[in-house]
Amino acid sequence: MNVKQALVLSGGGAKGAYETGCIKALQELNCDFDIVTGTSIGAMNGLLVAQQDYDKLYHLWETLTIEMVLKDPLHFDLSIESFMKNTGLIKPFVKSFMNNKGADNEPLKQLVRSLFDGQKAKNSPIRYGCCTVQFPQLKPLEISIDDMTVDNIIEYAIASASCFPAFPIHYINKQGYIDGGYYDNLPIHLAFQMGATDIIAIELNQEPTHSYLLSRENIRFIRPSRPLGGFLDFNRDILDWRIRLGYLDTMKSFHRLKGYQFAFRDERIDLKIAKRFHHAILKYEMENNHHTFNIDDNTPLLKVLLDNTYLDHLELEDYFIRGLELYMEHHHYQNDKLYRFEDIVHDIVNLEFNDEDFRHLNLLKKSGEMLKDLTTHQIVNYFLSYFYNTDQPQVIPENIFYKEYLIALFIYCLKTSL
């Protein structure tokens, strides 16, 4: 059987920067594609991939601003501060929006037409396809480059990204088109129609577009380890963060790096710590589930560890990784950097704490103060102190602070294993 590899790119507006980081990693991994399909921003990114204009793709997202997308844009993050800051821009934006029946995205169209080359796409060994929807018929159109002309290839990419009513309807030969995301935001089906046998599909949301296709032998999903934010958020720092995250998530997907919420070099894991942490969790959940007349299957600590990993179970080394990640989240480590396990272990080993919080919280309990007034740091320190002083009565119930309990448990297991 002739294997044909396809790259499938999701729609998602400014979140498309993430796909750029993914594609950069895929190039480094020497992934070659016979087919590329996309919807909306994925259709635009995909056309540059089909043209094999990777440098243009990277430069576009490294320099893109909202002014290059919209005329009279609003830099708006839905906060009252942002609203007040942009009051002078609201009137021209609304006027433009009403006149164009959507935000004026003419700058984006001009940008796309300057970057895309219909002839180059036609002659490329990578076959291109995109998804759009005819308007007002609301009839989906999955179209491959074989059914496009040199002149309208670019127009179909624009049509796929015409997110009506935010953007105006796009017309090709008097036929209106709106965003392909209204039909299929991740056109895997189109890729198979075009002859793909193996697929790499890049999502821009954490929720899967096609959940029934997960865990298939010939489909690899790359999904963001963090929420990517708003589809019209073109803040430069956010775009750069998305690019870096896409790169790291892709390397993790191909097992060149480790981690789920953070990224670590592919190095040896101290299984002694992992085993101790795993055993402590298992012991806790067995004790809380094993009753004389009733056996529950409640695994709250395991559920916290599985959260935001896309996993349905954990291998032994995953207990170590997730313990580190919970600690790092608690201490606000940057999530778009590459880390070494030993460096985070070193941080934990050198972590100083005392049992002042433990004694203080006993006093709080006696004085009747509310648990809601406690900080996360206090709660973690309390549980850590408790593990070192198990002869003391437990004041704070762990069943309303499972994450803090796990962080403290991991720190305790690590420190007492070394």
Image (tube, helix red, strand yellow):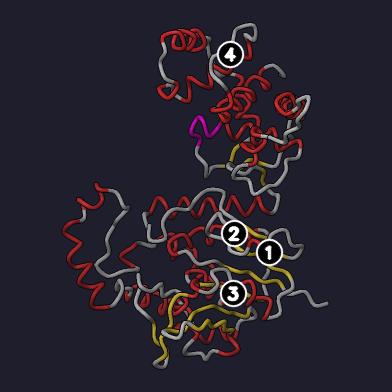
Q: Is residue 10 left or right of residue 92?
A: right
* Residue at x-position 43% and y-position 82%: 177
Q: Which residue is mark 2?
A: 208
Kindly state the secondary structure of the residue where label 2 is placed: loop
Which residue ends up furthest to the bottom in the rendered image?
173
- Quadrant for the C terminus in the image: top right
Contact check, label 2 and label 1, Cβ < 8 Å: yes
Give whichever of 105, 239 is nearer the camera: 105
| 94 on left or right of 257 | left
Q: Magenta part of the protein: which range?
A: 328-333
Within the image, what quadrant is residue 295 found in? top right
**Between disc 4 and disc 3, whose residue precedes?**
3
Indicate the amino acid at tag 3: Thr
The reply to whether dot 3 and dot 1 touch (C-beta < 8 Å) is: no
Q: Amino acid at mark 1?
A: Leu
Q: Which residue is mark 4?
A: 394
Q: To which residue does mark 1 refer? A: 213
Foreground label between 4 and 3: 4
Q: Is residue 103 above or below residue 88?
A: below
Mark in the foreground, 3 or 2: 2
Q: Count of labels shown?
A: 4
Which residue was labeled with disc 3? 37
Q: Nearer the viewer, mark 4 or mark 1?
A: 4
